Amino acid sequence: MIDTILYPIQWVVAWIMYGSHQFFTLLGFQDGPGFAWVLSIVALVIAIRILLIPLFFKQIKASRGMQMMQPELQAIQKKYKNKKDPSSREAMGRETMELYRKHGTNPMASCMPILLQSPIFFALFRLLYNLGDISTGADSAIGPIDQSVAADIEHSSLFGAQLSDIFLQTDDWGARIVILVLIVAMSATTFFTQRQLTMKNMPKAALEGPMANTQKMMLYALPVIFLISGVNFPVGVLIYWTTTNLWSMGQQFYTIKRMPAPGSEAERQLKEKQAAKAAKKGIVAEEPTEIAPPKPVGQREQPVRKNRKKKKR
């Protein structure tokens, strides 16, 4: 059932990997089983992440908006804290939705890139998992991956661990050590990717409250989940997820450096860097002066009446 649902995505994944492998063989890499199939998984990540770049920037904007609105959201929650009647709950929901519109965000927008990548992740998992059956003819081909190609992928390896090897299903301790290193790398890059986004690019006020506490909990929970579940992933999937995390870290580093969130540590560092560059050029940054609000157009200024001395009679 799951293979039927994922088949169209598996077909696309298969063609991207096959096309990438053909490209790497043209560059001089060995045809058949070899490192070119490892690189084809890296190429799959790059292709998918390039397609998701617009959504990535929407995710950054949405995450920033969710964090920046926390003080206002907490004020609404405090306002209706002890009010359980239907009208109060409705008013709370209406004000919360209005707050989302004001900041141009919603809870789902910040998760979209991860949600969209999940089917690709599972499609690759099933493709690598079924390589053995495809290579023996027990399963039909998926796109260009027929019996001979499936056998080539299955016997391709990274430091002795085949792309289809799973920690709990292999007796080769050399492969198990490679898999453990990849699991640790996947978990560590997941942690640092989340920490980079939440800790460095958020103002102090946004790092407090229920949502911030949830994100801090997820910051430590997700790597632990990956550490535990990683023993069930094929080597190819571990390579895919670690490469995805490394791409995310680089993308976020560039975004945070160029467009930090207002009031964040990243913004403070950017301003210090800009001030240091300006000082080297002999430019002194001026303090912003308060500008008086403009007078309403069309309203004449009323003359001030002078006190006149009364004439003595």
Image (spheres, grey):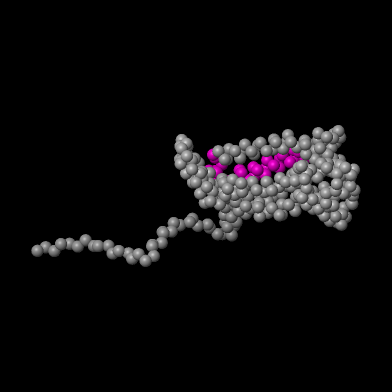
The magenta segment: 182-209
Which residue of the protein is positioned furthest toward the left in this rendering? 313
User: What residue is rendered at 54% in x and 47% in y?
Assistant: 68
Residue 189 included in the magenta stretch of the image: yes
User: What residue is rendered at 32% in x and 64% in y?
Assistant: 301
Q: Report if residue 234 is visible in the image.
A: yes
Question: 276 or 230, which lies in front?
Answer: 230
Question: 21 or 302, which lies in front?
Answer: 21
Q: Position of residue 85 (x, y in %)?
A: 46, 37
In the picture shown, does residue 222 fall above or below 268? Answer: above
Q: Overall secondary structure of the magenta stretch?
A: helix
In the picture shown, does residue 304 fall above or below 239? Answer: below
Question: 25 or 147, which lies in front?
Answer: 147
Q: Position of residue 278 (x, y in %)?
A: 58, 57
User: What residue is rendered at 67% in x and 44% in y?
Assistant: 193
Question: Which quadrant, please, contains the C terminus?
Answer: bottom left
Examine the image and state in which quarter residue 304 appears.
bottom left
Question: Which quadrant, please, contains the N terminus?
Answer: top right
Q: Is residue 59 toward the left or the right of residue 148 in the image?
A: left
Q: Is residue 229 toward the left or the right of residue 147 in the image?
A: left
Residue 260 included in the magenta stretch of the image: no
User: What residue is rendered at 72% in x and 37% in y?
Assistant: 226
Q: Position of residue 125 (x, y in %)?
A: 78, 43
Q: Position of residue 283 (x, y in %)?
A: 55, 59
